[in-house]
Image (cartoon, rainbow, N blue to C red):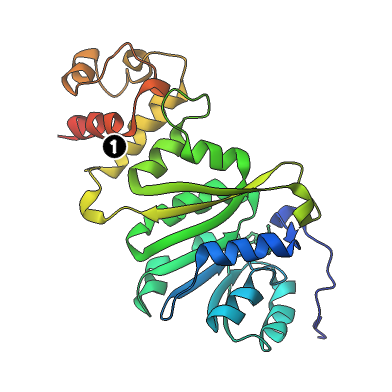
Amino acid sequence: MSRPTSFTEPAKKHLGQHFLHERGIISKIVQAVDPQPGDRLVEIGPGQGAITFPLLDRHGELTVIEFDRDLIFPLTEAARAHGTLEVIHRDVLKVDFTALAHNGGPIRLVGNLPYNLSSPILFHALEHAASIRDMHFMLQKEVVDRMAAEPGSKVYGRLSVMLQAYCHVTPLFTVPPGAFRPPPKVDSAVVRLVPCDPAAIRVRDRAKFEAVVRDAFGQRRKTLRNALALQCDAAAIEAAGVRPDARAEQIGVDDFVRLANSLSD
Ligand code: SAM
């Protein structure tokens, strides 16, 4: 079977393919990552190599995880001129980041993510947070706003609380649709996530924490007393130092952690 040696395939919508072409944006991403000798860099969704090749030029070696089989061969061929590329041809959600970190220490994840999978990829990375040094991701700006939102904001929700309980979230810069081919319909943004020191994570029972946050925001217009009726009564919420008549969007990450911990005692 003959294999394409250049990137001739049209972008695949179902794989969220929006290829970056704006050089200024690509250099800002590489500068934000700022690879240092010995770093173990792993890129999710290298596509046609827009970020891959500049990272390879700067760092010399890189592991990439790509699901689209049509891209694997041209990517591998084109990478030869830039450095040593290890290609993992797999769905990123099935990649064990902890196993990857066994060979060379905590990994640094980078990626212009397929937007249809951004939340599943973020939650998958959280599962492996102890093996990840940091993450630099391009996502829909609306998702980055939700990730970094504070209590009281309209976009503060489950994603904000779950990520901020485990990571420091820093939005870096916005990227307009014209920086991609084909252009997405919305603005994008690059965000940095740095997993907290495991000793500083106060969530005791992750499943309980997830359940409390999910139910609290599942019915965000309701008071916590009503939204959490299946988990606990008002007295238990009050005993954790949280107002039962507050709504989820008014409660800080620390309050959610305290509440879930007191319910899992
Ligand atoms: N990094 C390239 C760039 O910036 O131009 C491509 C970014 S494009 C938004 C997303 C990439 O993720 C595509 O190459 C797509 O094939 C890949 N992708 C989509 N779903 C994936 C999955 N489940 N696992 C790994 N890669 C995936």
Report the front residue among 88 and 1.
88
Kindly identify the residue that appears in the image at 38 percent across and 80 percent down.
103
Quarter of the picture containing the C terminus is top left
Q: Position of residue 125 (x, y in %)?
A: 44, 56
Residue at left 47%, top 30%? 156
Which is more toward the observer, 217 or 148? 148
Q: Residue furthest top?
A: 245
- When the figure is inspected, residue 124 is found, relative to residue 49, above or below; the finding is above
In the picture, measured across the screen, residue 229 lies left or right of residue 109, that is left
Kindly tell me whether residue 262 is visible in this rendering. yes
Residue 113: percent from left, percent from top? 61, 56
Q: Residues within 10 Å of mark 1 (few under 14, many from 20)?
A: some
The amino acid at mark 1 is Lys
Q: Is residue 153 left or right of residue 133?
A: right
Figure check: 265 above or below 2: above
Regarding mark 1 in the picture, which secondary structure is present there?
Answer: helix
User: Measured from the top left, where is residue 167 in percent x and y?
Assistant: 37, 49
User: Where does label 1 land, which residue?
Assistant: 208
Q: Is residue 189 left or right of residue 177?
A: left
Quarter placement of the N terminus: bottom right
Residue located 31% across and 14% down the image: 225
